[in-house]
């Protein structure tokens, strides 16, 4: 019987952000982080109960998992901005959701798009069967989103 991905994740000792596979769901990151945080926060345990056995490994895992969560969120930011704009959000609405200016929100999208363009080019250069990222037409379409006015929405037709 094979071990499920989740079971392998649960047993994985995380000491570096790179210990976390890129495809790990964010909810799994948070669940594991909560376990370590709870042991650290409750190291003494409730009155009348034995203390938890938190240690250096919990502290290091909590640090590494926080960094892994941060990287996951950063990696997904541009794609979510793209989705919001394509679904009719304005740049001002996206900027408000991010707590930044509309120019900064556009910069986030452009940076993500450039990384996706490079990813696509790399896959083409290495003759991979399935190309990830944005092809030239998709890249141009994403950049065009940045040209919308702050309160302009993508046209529905």
Image (cartoon, rainbow, N blue to C red):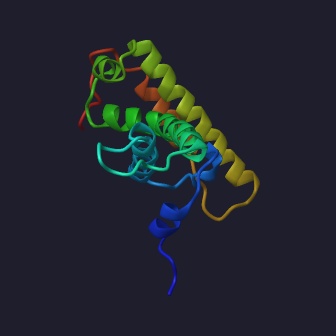
Residue situated in front as seen by the camera: 121 or 35? 35
Tell me if 35 is positioned left or right of 72 in this view. Answer: left
Toward the right, the furthest residue is 126
Quarter holding residue 83: top left
Residue at x 42%, y 53% (from the top left corner): 28
Above/below status of 80 relative to 89: below
Which residue shows up at 39% across the image and 32% down it? 81
Q: Is the residue 85 above or below the residue 136 in the image?
A: above
Of the pair 41 and 149, the residue shown nearer to us:
41
Q: Quadrant of residue 119?
A: top right
Q: Is residue 18 left or right of residue 147?
A: right
Q: Name the residue furthest front.
A: 48
Estimate the x, y position of residue 141 in percent, counting from the top left: 46, 35
Residue 5 x/y as whole percent: 49, 68
Quadrant including the C terminus: top left
Residue 67 point in image, percent of width and height: 55, 36
Q: Is residue 86 above or below residue 133?
A: above
For the point 53% across and 64% down, which residue is it?
11
């Amino acid at each position: 019987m094979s071990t499920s991905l989740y079971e392998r994740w649960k047993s994985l000792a995380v000491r570096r952000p790179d210990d976390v596979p890129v495809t790990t769901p964010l909810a799994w990151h948070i669940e594991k982080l909560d376990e370590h945080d709870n042991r650290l926060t409750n190291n003494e345990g409730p009155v009348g109960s034995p203390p938890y056995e938190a240690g250096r490994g919990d502290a290091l895992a909590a640090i590494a998992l926080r960094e892994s969560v941060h990287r996951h969120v950063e990696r997904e930011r541009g794609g979510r901005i793209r989705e919001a704009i394509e679904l009719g959000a304005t740049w001002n609405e996206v900027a408000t959701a991010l707590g930044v200016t509309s120019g900064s929100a556009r910069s986030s999208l452009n940076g993500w798009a450039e990384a996706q363009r490079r990813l696509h080019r790399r896959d083409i250069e290495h003759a991979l069967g399935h190309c990830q990222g944005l092809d030239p037409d998709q890249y141009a379409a994403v950049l065009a989103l940045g040209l919308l006015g702050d309160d302009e929405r993508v046209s529905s037709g």
